[in-house]
Amino acid sequence: MKKILCIGDLALDVIAQLKESINYGNDTASRISTHPGGQAANVSTWITRTNTKAQLVARVGNDPVGFALISDLDKYGVEHMNLMRSGRPTGVVVILVDSNGERTMFPDNGANADLEVSDLPPLDDVDGVYVSGYALLDFRSRDAVLAMVKKVKAAGIPIYFDPTTTGAMKIVPLKEVLSWVSLMDGILLNAEEALYLGDATNIEDAEESLKKFTPLVVIKLGSRGAVAVFNDQSARVAAVTTNVVDTTGAGDSFAAGFIPMWLETRDLETALSAGTALAAKCVATVGARPPLN
């Protein structure tokens, strides 16, 4: 059984499903729920649903939320070491979900900002690594994560990178984000992120631009499926039809489906299909994690 190491973040998601348009400066009817979250943590939990082992590198605070999030990881069977540290509180992400299921996020990285290179576990049994963009976009954890990436590359283990939203990326110069992409064996991103990073106006040009930095480019197209290029290979698959309730975690679940299958088969179409299938399960429920039942 293969094992994927996920580097990045673990947090609490506070999701507000809006029943009407926001009444700024006044009350807005909504349904509010809390869920375990964090990009890298979400990916790790979905990976456990693919007959693949997962291990997480992240941080939580020494607080009740931190204890609860660690307990949740244990229920999924996600491996972890030294997640809890005193200092900053556990990270929180406030997520507004509109009537179409589209989400807007307000992240606070919390304790994840304190990642150190010593948090990297032994790599002897690791087959692939996933890196969350939030861990590199936060200047407080950036150097530690780049040092981890260097160690992973020295061990000859492939690394796959999700740079997160364009809004988050814009706090760092585009040239610097692309320098991170050039360290990776593959990048997974959505259409908006691809156009931004590729400095392009269409997906095809974005692919060609990003191929200069990394051999594998995977672009999620939402209801239009997903496309990927690897060197001179290319593939496209349709989305899996489902009832969209909440798109939170869609990209995370896609990555969890794609990466293990790609490592196993090296077949773009098969890996894309695995990613879209898992993403369809994610968007059909509220929250970014797979159901435990």
Image: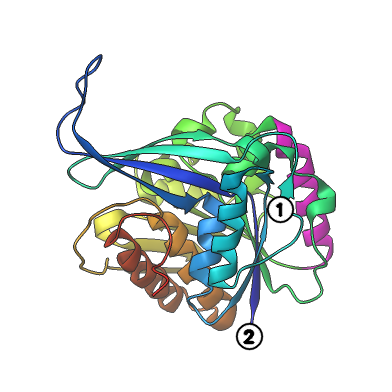
Decide which of tag 1 and tag 2 comes sooner along the chain: 2
The circle drawn on residue 1 is 2
Magenta stretch, main secondary structure class: helix
- Whether residue 9 appears in this view of the structure is no
What's the residue at 63%, 49% (across, down)? 8
Q: Does the magenta-highlighted stretch encompass residue 206?
A: no
- The image quadrant of residue 179 is top right
Does residue 137 sit above or below 209 in this rendering?
A: above
Name the side, left or right, on which 224 lies relative to 56: left
Q: What residue range appears in magenta?
A: 140-156
Task: Tell which residue pokes out farthest to the bottom in this image.
Answer: 1
The image position of residue 59, as x and y in percent, is: 68, 47
What's the residue at 70%, 51% (across, down)? 183
The circle drawn on residue 83 is 1
Name the side, left or right, on which 15 lies relative to 181: left
Q: Nearer the viewer, residue 152 or 106?
A: 106
Asked which secondary structure carries label 2, the reply is: loop
